[in-house]
Image: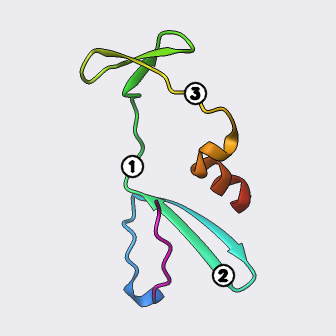
């Protein structure tokens, strides 16, 4: 789970090559930044129920959720939007 915390802007350092997104909502600013992009996917889909983990070569079964609320990450993204 992601921790949300408020910091002083004088304590914040972001590297020049970092990709940054900024959202403003009134007097609140949300800054999101990453060190870089992942350029290759660690999995390859075989079917809707199976995939291959490319780092180990292992074939795994996909776990399907029955509804959106089984995935808190999905609900959190909807609320933020």
Please give the name of the residue rendered at 42% of the width and 44% of the height, measured from the top-left corner. Answer: 37
Please give the name of the residue rendered at 61% of the width and 67% of the height, measured from the top-left corner. Answer: 22
Q: Nearer the viewer, mark 2 or mark 1?
A: 2
Q: Is residue 81 above or below residue 68?
A: below
Please give the name of the residue rendered at 50% of the width and 83% of the height, measured from the top-left corner. Answer: 6
Of 53 and 50, the residue lying toward us: 50
Of mark 1 and mark 3, the one earlier in the sequence is 1
Q: Nearer the viewer, mark 3 or mark 2?
A: 3
* Render colour scheme: rainbow
User: Label 1: which residue?
Assistant: 36
Q: Nearer the viewer, mark 1 or mark 3?
A: 3
Q: Residue furthest top?
A: 46
| Residue 50 screen position, x and y as percent | 47, 14
| Residue 35 screen position, x and y as percent | 37, 55
Q: Are marks 2 and 1 in contact (CB under 8 Å)?
A: no
What is the crowding at mark 3: few (fewer than 14 residues within 10 Å), some, or many (at least 20)?
few
**SS of the residue under disc 3:** loop
The residues bearing labels 3 and 2 have C-alpha atoms spaced at a distance of 36 Å
Indicate which disc residue 64 carries: 3
**SS of the residue under disc 1:** loop
What is the crowding at mark 2: few (fewer than 14 residues within 10 Å), some, or many (at least 20)?
few
User: Label 2: which residue?
Assistant: 28
| Residue 14 screen position, x and y as percent | 40, 70
Of mark 2 and mark 1, the one earlier in the sequence is 2
- Looking at the rendering, the stretch of residues picked out in magenta corresponds to 1-7
Of 37 and 45, the residue lying toward us: 45
The residues bearing labels 1 and 3 have C-alpha atoms spaced at a distance of 29 Å
Q: Are marks 3 and 2 in contact (CB under 8 Å)?
A: no
Q: Is residue 32 above or below residue 37?
A: below
Q: Magenta part mainly helix, strand or loop?
A: loop
Q: Is residue 44 above or below residue 1?
A: above
């Amino acid at each position: 789970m992601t921790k949300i915390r408020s910091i002083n802007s004088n304590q914040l350092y972001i590297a020049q090559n970092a990709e940054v997104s900024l959202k403003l909502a009134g007097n609140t600013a949300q800054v999101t930044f990453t060190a870089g992009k992942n350029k290759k996917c660690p999995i390859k889909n075989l079917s809707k129920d199976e995939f291959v983990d490319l780092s180990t070569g292992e074939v795994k079964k996909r776990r399907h959720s029955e509804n959106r609320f089984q995935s808190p990450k999905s609900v959190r993204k909807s609320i933020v939007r």
